[in-house]
Image (cartoon, helix red, strand yellow):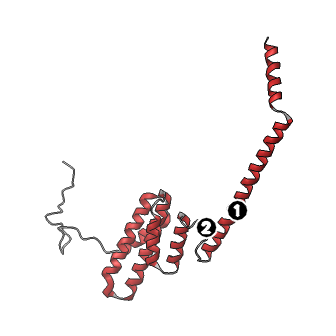
Amino acid sequence: MALNFKKLSAEKICHFFTAKKLSWLLAVIAVTATASAIYNFNRIQQIAAFNHAISKGKPPQTDLQSFEAKFSTAYWLAKNERYKEATLLFNKALNGANTEQKAAIQYNLGNIFFLRGLIINGTSMTVRDEAEYLLRQAKTAYQQSLRLDNSNWGARHNLDRLLTMLPGTPTPGVGESDTPGLIMGNIPVGLP
């Protein structure tokens, strides 16, 4: 009985896969594979054109709303010392970016603020407050980048250099002398 069942199943399978049905199945697979190959070839050409346009500093023709287009355009603007436009584009690119992309954006914003602070600080001592503001903005951006991606050694390095340049934050209650005042005593907080 079991032998009869196997023979019957094999006949049904052979009957289902006739030469005509196999030919149609293979034709559908071939058409699908050809369409997929054409689409992938076209997409590769678009990516190559996108990369070429970005490397030349021109706006790309495809993927205009992609994160890569916004990031690349902002990066190019920053490289060409158009910091305000670059900052605006980087901030726009934050919307919809994943954690790694946000860390990269914050790192680049930190670099922009750092460079602007160095440029302003080098020209005159009358703009000290503005330079300090920009350097503090850079510090905040580097810290945000490190919160998002702690493995970014560029952000760590730049933050370290930046911290040596910033003036110390005054401690409340500390006057001209080095002794703490009434607000900040020598008693550790949280200990009995």
Of residues 184 and 70, the one nearer the viewer is: 70
> On the picture, is 56 further left or further right than 34?
left
Residue at figure coordinates x 74%, y 55% from the top left: 37
| Badge 2 element | loop
Q: Position of residue 164 (x, y in %)?
A: 38, 73
In which quadrant of the rendered view does residue 10 lie? top right
Of residues 19 and 139, the one nearer the viewer is: 19
From the image, tell me which residue sits under label 1: 42
Residue at figure coordinates x 80%, y 25% from the top left: 12
Q: How far separated are the C-alphas under marks 2 and 1?
A: 12 Å
> On the picture, is 181 further left or further right than 111?
left
For mark 1, does the 10 Å Cα neighbourhood hold few (<14), some (14 to 19), or many (20 or more) residues?
few
| Badge 1 element | helix
Residue at figure coordinates x 33%, y 87% from the top left: 125
Residue at figure coordinates x 18%, y 66% from the top left: 180
Mark toward the start of the polypeptide (2 vs 1): 1
> On the picture, is 75 further left or further right than 91?
right
Q: Position of residue 178 (x, y in %)?
A: 21, 71
Question: In this view of the protein, can residue 163 be seen by the observer?
Answer: no
Labelled disc at residue 161: none
As drawn, which residue projects farthest toward the right? 19
From the image, tell me which residue sits under label 2: 62
Which amino acid type is marked by label 2? Thr
Q: Position of residue 75 (x, y in %)?
A: 52, 73
Instruction: State whether residue 122 is above or below residue 102.
Output: below
For mark 2, does the 10 Å Cα neighbourhood hold few (<14), some (14 to 19), or many (20 or more) residues?
some
Which amino acid type is marked by label 1? Asn
Question: In this view of the protein, can residue 116 be seen by the observer?
Answer: yes
Of residues 173 and 50, the one nearer the viewer is: 50
